[in-house]
Image (cartoon, rainbow, N blue to C red):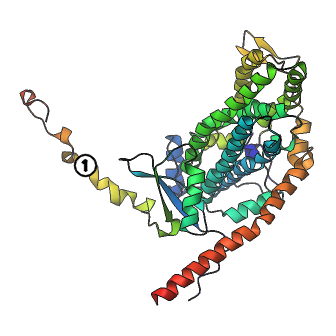
Amino acid sequence: MYTQAMDIPDEPGKKLASVSTTVSDQEAAFEARIDADGRIEPQDWMPDAYRKTLVRQISQHAHSEIVGMLPEGNWISRAPSLKRKAILIAKVQDEGGHGLYLYSAAETLGTSRDQMLEGLHSGKAKYSSIFNYPTLNWADVGVIGWLVDGAAIMNQIPLCRCSYGPYSRAMIRVCKEESFHQRQGYEALLVMMQGTEAQKAMVQDAVNRLWWKCLAMFGPPDADSPHSAQGMRWGIKRISNDELRQKFIDATVPQAKVLGVTLPDPDLKWNEERQHHDYGQIDWQEFWNTVEGNGPCNKERLATRVKAHNDGQWVRDAALAYTRKQQQRAQKEAA
Amino acid sequence: MNTPALKEWPLWEVFVRSKQGLEHKHCGSLHAADAAQALHMARDVYTRRQEGVSIWVVPSAAITASNPDDKGELFDPAADKIYRHPTFYEIPEEVGHM
């Protein structure tokens, strides 16, 4: 998911300290507020491990939004019409905005923007595995909206109730905007499905390539997700990986039917007893391989991101130099 | 006097008035080199869908916030002063709305 932080094991020897044995008054007050489903705000006392978990999750969520601009950005100059181009620019701009809301939320925890960017650019911090796959044809842009953003919405709606105030407020803003992303993608695909055989084949091809990656976005099964239980306890994570994945599949199957595409899973079928769809095995080896940096586009995405940042250095420097000059001029005039 | 050499753009808090007649409400923060740039960026980051008709930006460092540890002293004294609310007073029904 955009927030795969919960699912990635700590580096050896850097395990987050879990709840300590001596419970201070502050800690008791914190726990009581969490139990009462209250919110924690930046100035409130919080355990170090809670702070670290949030910094990690929110910054990686932000990185996902920023890197997520790249696969779609590739298609801005190749969009099939002015209308689709305007829509895509607006969507990519939204993703940039979502990254900024989230970086701001993480900064309230005492980390700095530079530190977070350093983490991303050095490869130390992760971002969602889904953006390490290529966007090969125009239908991929539609499928990203429909399925990738659809999966993101599934994950982000419960985050609107996250125990950390600034994160939950950022998520409310993000979710309001995200619905446009999913709908524009689905609608673009509907139009293609009324086109030529070749266009229909493009849609099916994009769905075939991205379906399993979208299911993996929710993260490993609950049993293999190292931080899930603590995240649930703290009200950071509200619904488990498997439960969100199931909700996503159940919501998507009828949409695929209306669209007229097949989801590439022979085991996918309605289970009357469970009142859910059964589905096949996800290739977790492939997921971990991508998370660890060996997916098809990891190197290219990171290199593009670092280059964009470095190429913009002179702009940031110039803006600061201009501000300093203005301040000095104002001080001289006042003297 | 030398202004300290900043490496990062400073942080600004953004307040947006959603429509004429309503108050400016805090909606988030952003980094910008100066006030003019902060306004410009606030427009792009927080009002892409006509969320506002007016924006304030304030340097985050200029805000003085109450300390959460003082919450008791600051706000609890108001809890037992229910006579400050209109519902504390019983008025005969025949008086009607007051």
Can you say which quadrant of the picture contains the N terminus of chain A? top right
Q: Position of residue B46 (x, y in %)?
A: 56, 50
Q: Residue at x 54, y 63 (%)?
A: B12
Asked if residue A249 can be seen in this view, the reply is yes
Above or below — where is A143 with respect to A169? above
Given residues A48 and B83, the one toward you in this image is B83
User: B25 left or right of A230?
Assistant: left
Q: Which residue is drawn at 36% across and 57% down?
A: B72
Please name the residue that numbered disc 1 is placed on: B80
Above or below — where is A262 with respect to A128? above
Badge 1, how many Cα within 10 Å: few under 14, some, many 20+? few
Q: Which residue is drawn at 87% across and 40% down?
A: A133
Residue type at numbered disc 1: Asp
Q: Where is residue A191 in the image (x, y as percent from the top left)?
A: 76, 23
Above or below — where is A45 with respect to A217? below
Place residue A249 in its image quadrant.
top right
